[in-house]
Image (cartoon, rainbow, N blue to C red):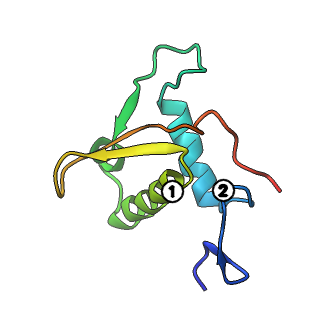
């Protein structure tokens, strides 16, 4: 069964996250500024192309999958101006929240 399933149902944002989801979210939180944060040194967005530069194809695909999961749960926003173009990653409505640990 796919790792994002639990008991036949898709995992929700309130159940314990997979370690890869937590890792990607933690990395995004370290690198993207959000409203509740005082650190103005961080940019307000990241580029997927720059994020995945130098990564293996497998790693880049894994990060992309986790970003889609985080977007589904409103933790990040993803914008793409054109097909196959770069993807802009910004903080979503729930970005300041912590991953569930239950």
Q: Which residue is mark 1?
A: 72
> How far is mark 2 from mark 1, CA to CA?
9 Å
Give the residue at x 35% y 55%: 55
Among the two numbered marks 2 and 1 on one chain, the one whose residue lies closer to the N terminus: 2
Above or below for 87 versus 30: below
* Element at label 2: loop
Occupied quadrant, residue 51: top left
Q: Which residue is mark 2?
A: 13
Q: Position of residue 65 (x, y in %)?
A: 45, 63
Locate residue 22, reporting x and y percent: 63, 51
Q: Which mark is residue 40?
A: none
Instruction: Identify which residue is drawn at 73% across, 82% down.
Output: 7
| In front of the other: 61 or 95 | 95
| Image quarter of the N terminus | bottom right
Relative to 9, say whether 58 is above or below.
above
Residue 26: horizontal and vertical position, in percent? 59, 42
């Amino acid at each position: 069964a796919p790792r994002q399933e639990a008991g036949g149902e898709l995992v929700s944002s309130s159940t314990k996250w997979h370690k890869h989801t937590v890792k990607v979210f933690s990395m995004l939180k370290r690198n993207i500024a959000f409203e509740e944060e005082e650190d103005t040194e961080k940019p307000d967005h990241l580029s997927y192309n720059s994020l995945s530069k130098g990564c293996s194809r497998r790693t880049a695909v894994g990060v992309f999958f986790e970003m889609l999961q985080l977007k589904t749960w409103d933790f990040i926003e993803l914008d793409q101006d054109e097909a196959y173009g770069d993807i802009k990653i910004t903080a979503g409505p729930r970005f300041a929240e912590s991953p569930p640990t239950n």
